[in-house]
Every structure is written in structure tokens, then in C-alpha cells.
Image: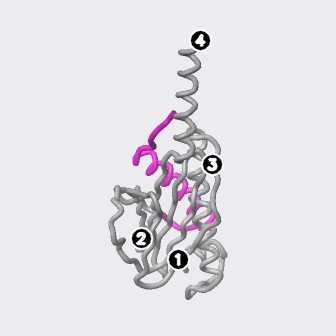
Amino acid sequence: MIDRISPEEITTVVRTAAHEVFSTMLGLPLEDCLAFQEAVSSPAPSYDGVEALVGIGGSWSGTGRICCSANFACALAGGLLMMECDSLNEDVLDAISEVANMIIGNVKTSFEEKLGPLGLSIPTVVFGRNYQTRSSGVTAWTVVPFQSGGEVFEVRFYIMPSRNSAQCHARTENSHSGALQAV
């Protein structure tokens, strides 16, 4: 059983997914920046802008997040919807939700080859000034930043074996070793 996905694996898969979405669905350039690990601090730092969170569940669970400024959210929505978007509105927030769903969905699909079937939650979008988000159980994010048109776009990702899956796996191993000893 795989017990860990490395930050390097996450970075590679996230970059592939983001480049695919940006080139095929948004028509926007995307440049890689240096990826890094960020420990979760308490209290969490506050942000300004737009963030979309998508949960992952199955034998592994986690969260994927996309983060950007309000201006870049409008640019992403404009690329997706092929229309001018000047301010945060319902269309822009829906488009950000869809961009997160596409990128994190592609990441999930790539990891399924190694981890088995995984599901996605409905995206949640958070926006405004000086807001904070928190995902329970996350100890460190793999942060994969990009630049596009002078703007920063980040994908943050965390995944670990699900507790129920790990407990079930341990029980299965214990019951098999007990059965072997009884024979």
C-alpha cells in the first residue's frame, strides 16, 4: 500500500493539469514558478482575492485549492466564457469554480492510477479582503505557483490516506496474519 505521495509528484501532476486547462480551455499563457511546501500555521494567514476549494475523497482524501487576485479571476472567467469580465460577479465566481473543478479533477484522475477511485466534492468559492480558510487535517500544503500576464496564480494541494482506509487496511492485515497463524 502506498503511504505517501511526494511533493515532487504533486507538483508534476498539478503543473500538467494547470497547463492543460490554461491552454485548451482558457487560452491564457502560464509560466511555472518554484513550487514549495508550506506548513499550516495557526492562526492562518489572511488573503485578499478569490479562492476555490475542491475536496477529494476515497481511500485517500485531501483538498485542492486555486488562489488568485480578483483581477485575475476576471481574466480567467473572460477566457473561459469568452466575454469581458470587469468585476467579481456570479459569472466570474462560477467560472472560478469550474476552473478549480477542471484542474483538481485532472489531478485526481492522474492520481487514481496509483491510488484507486477517488471522488470530488462540489467546489466552494471564497472571495473578499482579509479572509482566512482552513482545511481540517492538513499539516502542509504543496504550493505550485504560476504567473500569467503579470499575475500570480497558485494551486495548493494536500492528499493523504483516509483514516478509515488505513484502519481497514491495518485490520485486514491483522486478520490475515491471525488466520495464517491459526492454520
Q: Looking at the picture, which amino acid does disc 4 mark?
A: Val
Q: Are marks 1 and 2 in contact (CB under 8 Å)?
A: no
Please indicate whether residue 15 sits to the left or right of residue 93 in the image.
left
Does residue 108 lie above or below 97 as drawn?
Answer: above
Mark 4 vs mark 2, CA separation in Å: 61 Å
Q: Which mark is residue 152?
A: 2
Tell me the residue at 35%/56% (across/down). 37
The span picked out in magenta is: 1-30
Mark 1 vs mark 2, CA separation in Å: 17 Å
Read off the residue under disc 1.
126
Read off the residue under disc 4.
183
Mark 1 vs mark 4, CA separation in Å: 57 Å
Label 1 neighbourhood size at 10 Å, few (<14), some (14-19), many (20+)?
some
Q: Nearer the viewer, mark 1 or mark 2?
A: 1
Label 3 neighbourhood size at 10 Å, few (<14), some (14-19), many (20+)?
some
Is residue 71 inside the magenta stretch?
no
- Find residue 154 and report its image quarter: bottom left
Residue at far front of view: 182
- Dominant SS in magenta: helix
Read off the residue under disc 3.
118
Is residue 20 inside the magenta stretch?
yes
Q: Looking at the picture, which amino acid does disc 3 mark?
A: Leu
Residue 136's x, y, as percent?
47, 62
Query: Mark 1: which secondary structure?
Result: strand
Q: How is the image coloured?
A: one colour
Query: Mark 2: which secondary structure?
Result: strand
Q: Earlier in the sequence, mark 3 or mark 2?
A: 3
Q: Earlier in the sequence, mark 4 or mark 3?
A: 3
Residue 3's x, y, as percent?
46, 39
